[in-house]
Amino acid sequence: MGTMLIAGVIGWLMGKVKIPTSPAILDLILGPMAEKNFRTALLKSSGNVGVFFNTPICWFFLALIAFTLFGAVRGQLKKKAE
């Protein structure tokens, strides 16, 4: 009962601050799994973070992320200029 009450209060506060709940729930579910796999990859590569950047598909997704962030910032700046 206490867990439900705490979750309800957190959900209500997130609604008041206009934080979308779907990404938060996905983070709670996928976060620990992603962290575990990240640690496993680092252990297998002896701590070399370069293992995350050595394939073309990785560079494609990094470029896609950069393009998306650039577009979002550009849109906000354009909206502010109007």
Image: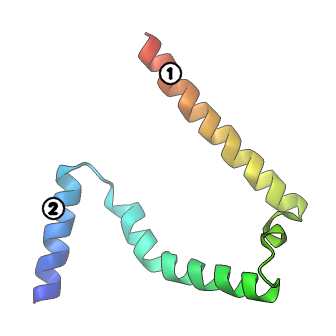
| Callout 1 crowding tier (Cα within 10 Å): few <14, some 14–19, many ≥20 | few
Q: Name above or below for residue 41 compared with residue 64.
A: below
Which numbered disc covers residue 77? Answer: 1
Left or right of residue 31: residue 1 = left
Please name the amino acid that badge 2 sits on.
Answer: Trp
In this view, the residue farthest toward the top is 82
Per the image, label 2 sits on a secondary structure element best described as: helix
Q: Quadrant of residue 49?
A: bottom right
Classify the position of the C terminus by image quarter.
top left
Residue 16 at x, y percent in the picture: 17, 51
List x then y, in percent, for residue 41.
74, 82
Name the residue rendered at 37%, 65% in the picture. Answer: 24
Task: Tell me which corner region of the image, top left, top right, bottom left or bottom right, holds residue 67.
Answer: top right
Comes first in the chain, label 2 or label 1: 2
Q: Which residue is mark 2?
A: 12
The residue under the point 11% across, 87% down is 2
Question: Residue 57: x, y in percent?
Answer: 84, 60
The residue shown at (21%, 55%) is: 15
Q: Is residue 35 above or below residue 79?
A: below
Q: Is residue 59 left or right of residue 41?
A: right
Where disc 1 sits, the SS reads: helix
Going by the numbered disc 1, the residue's amino acid type is Leu
Residue appearing at x 41%, y 75% in the figure: 28
**Position of 14 relative to 50 (above/below):** above
Nearer to us: label 2 or label 1: 1
